[in-house]
Amino acid sequence: MKKFLLQLTILFAPMMAFSQQNGWSPEQQEEFKQQMDEFKEQLQQEMDQLRDSLAVMNDKLKSQNWQLFDSLGINFNWPEIPSPPDLPSAPDVPFPPDLPGEPGDPSTDSTEVRIGRWKMIVDDQDDGDTKVNVFKDEEECEDEDENDDEMKNIRTRFALLDVGLNNYFGPSLTSNFPAAYDALEPIPGKSLGVNLHVINQQLNLIGYHLWLSYGAFFEFNSYKFNSDDVLIPKVDSIAFTTSENALSKNKLSAEYVGIPIMLRYESNTDLSKSFHIALGGYGEYLLGAHTKTKTTSGDKIKQHDDFNLNRFKYGVTGRIGYGWLSVFVNYSLSELFESGAGPVLTPASAGLAFEF
């Protein structure tokens, strides 16, 4: 009996919910209610007949008169369930078409590659053609610009490069050396200098236009001579010896580590569109030096020593430029050689600075 009632409940619950949620008119609801009342009345009659038959069967079982069991005439007819009225048909909802490049679309197969601010999309079409689209991601640029704005008070860059020419001057910026030191006269345009700025930081001082610039760099200087006189190592003063063979190369190289400090003005917060000028000073320490000679026959000789070079060097520096390219000038306020060890010579260098 419990199972039978449960089936009725399961049957009627969806029908009642269906009639309430699908927008029947009042006339349709009233018609359906009358049909359900008639169904309930028929069902009640059948239930009463079933109850009477079960009572008679119970009495017969107690008297164990099994022959009468077949004459009980138990018969239960399930009344016909009324069908609900027809509902208005719902309008057809158009199915959105697949967008190109979306998953499940066999017409395209896209591959996306991002490198910094640049994005490349490769589309393999179903006709066998391949379409490549390369463009700058403006949203990514905006995000990066926003991050840059947040970090603009301190900017850090690495591996900046200066390339220029070296020279040195006598007193009052003359190039007239004492006769004993004529061999030190460098060849113009062939004495090179390279500054590698390992790290450079800029601290915002005023409105992102005036900055304090500082960092660390290595300086590699070479002075080429047009002479067969070679510097003598491990002596207390500048001295030369004449090579027995003619020389095709004769140079002095020196390596320093230094720290620059400058005030820098920029006209635009966008570095690629900015005119900039910087002035300041620097201090350096001698790491090592060597001479290198090569004879016309191809023999090479390299000798390592400090050659009485001044271990500490300091001076003034300046640069002016636009965007990533600048012109720099370094002028030493200290002498090239230790005091009393040789002629009074003042180093200087100039060239191009690349600030990528």
Image (spheres, rainbow, N blue to C red):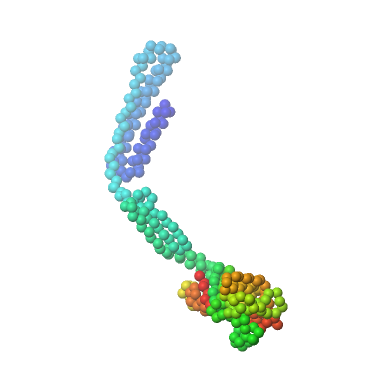
Residue farthest right in this picture: 236
Query: Where is 33 relative to 102, above or below?
Result: above
**Image quadrant assignment for residue 223:** bottom right
Percent position of residue 211, x then y? 56, 75
**Residue 65 visible in the shown view:** yes
Please give left or right for residue 8 compared with residue 345 in the image.
Answer: left
Please give left or right for residue 241 compared with residue 14 in the image.
Answer: right
Percent position of residue 264, x then y? 55, 77
Q: Residue at x 56, y 80 (%)?
A: 187
Q: Residue at x 42, y 18 (%)?
A: 58
Query: Where is 196 relative to 69, above or below?
Result: below
**Residue 318 visible in the shown view:** no
Q: Residue at x 53, y 77 (%)?
A: 351
Percent position of residue 278, x then y? 55, 78
- Quadrant containing the N terminus is top left
Q: State the residue in front, 4 or 240.
A: 240
